[in-house]
Amino acid sequence: MTTTAQIQPTFEAWRSKARELLKHGVAPENVDWVDASQTASLLAEQPADHQTAPNASVKVPADFLRLAANVCAHTDERRFAILYRLLHRVALGGEKHLLAMPTDRDMHQCNLWAKAVSRDIHKMHAFVRFRLVGVNEQNGREQFVAWFEPEYRITRLASPFFEKRFASMEWSILTPDECANWDGHKLTFMPGMSRHDAPAADAHDDLWRTYYRSIFNPARLKVQAMQSEMPMKYWKNLPEAEIIHDLIASSDQRVRAMIATPERPVKPAPNNAYLNSLRNKPEKLTSPAPASPVSAP
Amino acid sequence: MDLTRKLVILADAAKYDASCASSGAARKDSRDGKGIGSTGGMGICHSYTPDGRCVSLLKVLLTNACLYDCHYCINRRSSNVQRARFTPEEVVQLTLDFYKRNYIEGLFLSSGIVRSADFTMEQVIEVARQLREVHHFRGYIHLKTIPEASQALIDKAGRYADRISINIELPSQKSLDRLAPEKNLTNTMQAMHGIRQRIDENVNAKKAARQIVNRPRAKAPAFATGQSTQMIVGADDSTDALVLHRADELYRDCRLRRVYYSGFSPIPEPSVLLPIKPPPLVREHRLYQADWLLRFYGFDVGELLPKEDPNLDLDLDPKLAWALRNRADFPVNINRAPQELLWRIPGLGTVNVARILAARRWASLTLADLQRMRVNLKKVMPFIIAADHRPHIAQLESTNLRQQFLPGPRQLELNFNAPPPTTPADATMVLSGQL
Ligand code: SF4
């Protein structure tokens, strides 16, 4: 018969449910996985027709757990079922080597999901922008808030990075699904919030845009390359993105101005003791030739 | 001059350095609640500019005043560019302010040469010292070093920095004499050897420290974990063979993490000795590909660039070009061949080779398996044998095979700008975002 596994869409919830099902040897095709946060009715979870044996443990490779944590953060509704099938095959189906089989269909699918999620985590580490909101009067720590819109449910997976890096600040990262909060000692999580709960700008954004504008080389315009790494969906929360169009539009003109500039003559060397000492070095031309049959032309 | 104006001038002055890596630093963080920052593992690109380049570090010059006259450089003494100078405190504050907002991974500081090499180095080091000792900054620091500076100062720079670099600029002294007359290849190589020695000593000291158990361990003195350099391409008439032989020598002898190839790009303030032309982006890209083959695929320069042809084929990637010259080595059986041969198959990267080696222990691999790994079948098929595939020998011998691989006119435009990641492992992490 079919069991309905109704869980909150988190790795922890999936893991404890999967562990329970596995202990009773429930076959993957007999489980119907339901995301409790997506179902309108708050039906009590259907009582399991088997009892949990709390001490029996299921051993799976650590690699699998890492994969599962990422897959669960994805939003595809098939993820819990496929992940359970994979687990069942590894733990009970005698396919211990599955994790080394990127060509297997289930592995392939889970790898794709995990990859999309880790890319999203990486982009969150890159594109979160903190805004200074105040200073804690008791301990002098600066307080920052950021607003970010990840594609998947990754706040928990992405937060330890910020903890390590910004441990001496107080910060919150607000996202629509879940918010992270660091008070200088402890990382806690709260329900999602809205963009209006976060400050819109920081006094340093202007200086940052100045830097961004100045480090750009108009002679090497490659908009495609930029967009493949920094897709437009992230632009709305990046202060520097405001000036991208401007930079692109003016680049052609700037290059033409360079080309039209008269070439500058060579100025003689000033009388400087250090420069003179360089010129007097006798061994200047004794550079070793490359160790190869090809030598300088 | 106000800070914004200085930032405009001194970031503009720094943008021709292609180096952007913030990876490969020793693991450190600020969970002890003192100071700020973390490094370790791969670096992060916090933004991208419309030239396709990653913005990872605050990359600025301390000053753009310079005694030297390098003709490819906007800061040379013959240029009429406006000059500016940051105080060390200004750079320190900017770095911290940007870092706390998660704009950057850290600082990449370089400088025009003022008064003397030692004087300039001391200024640069002072910034790093303040960041590390006054503010306990644990983010990434990359310091540009001047080869003529004293060994004591280079050592000091290495103690504060995660990475130090000296730009070799051009592959031969002959080219330097014409375009960067103050620069000296021998000095540069000697300084790189010196840095390598320090890095090695430090690695050994760390290893030794790890062996001591059960007593307070002597902490190995910190030192940069890597050095890199940059070569400008297209400003002189050096061949690709000369460029790559020089790079290969640096990788072997000085154990460089990275050689960056920077296509000479138009600058405001062009020199009469070096008229400006469009940057050789495709050539730059092919050099990066060849560099990759040297470091991770077991190729040597002579194989990629036979004597009679000292420049890379701009139309084909260097591995494919090599395979077409060496068709007798193919087809290769993906279910049997050793790793070194799999690495030589056009269209197969080290990551997919590792997957093939893992998966073929359990099953004989087919084209569908390769497809699932996102291998470009059209590219590999003429060169491989799979469980369900064997290429026609006629196809492999056909003179049209090269034709078949020539890119459409538009494809050449793709992604030729940003330097690729430092290692294949970094590359997969960039794709997958794994940490
Ligand atoms: S030393 Fe040469 S490359 Fe460096 S800033 Fe001066 S002129 Fe430019």
Image: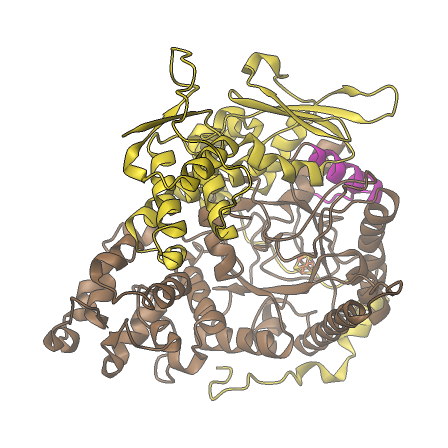
Chain colours: A yellow, B brown
* Closest to the observer, A13 or B237: A13
Q: Provide residue B374's location: percent of width, then percent of height.
A: 30, 53
Picture quarter with ligand 1: bottom right
* Closest to the observer, B155 or B309: B155
Identify the residue at horizontal 64%, vertical 38% (top origin). A160
Residue B98 painted magenta? yes
- Dividing the picture into quadrants, the one containing residue A267 is bottom right
Range drawn in magenta? B82-100
Check the picture and name the quadrant holding the N terminus of chain A: top left
Check the image and report above or below for B307 versus B360: below
**Residue A119 in view here:** no
Residue B21 painted magenta? no
Q: Horizontal placement of B309 versus B209: left or right?
A: left
* Closest to the observer, A59 or B255: A59
Residue extending farthest bottom: A293
Check the image and report above or below for A293 versus A99: below
Identify the residue at horizontal 18%, vertical 66% (top origin). B403
Identify the residue at horizontal 37%, vertical 66% (top origin). B353
What secondary structure characterizes most of the magenta part? helix
Identify the residue at horizontal 39%, vertical 20% (top origin). A46
Q: Provide residue A213's location: percent of width, then percent of height.
A: 57, 35
* Closest to the observer, A123 or B110: A123
- Dividing the picture into quadrants, the one containing residue A33 is top left
**Residue A176 in view here:** yes
Q: Provide residue A285's location: percent of width, then percent of height.
A: 66, 83
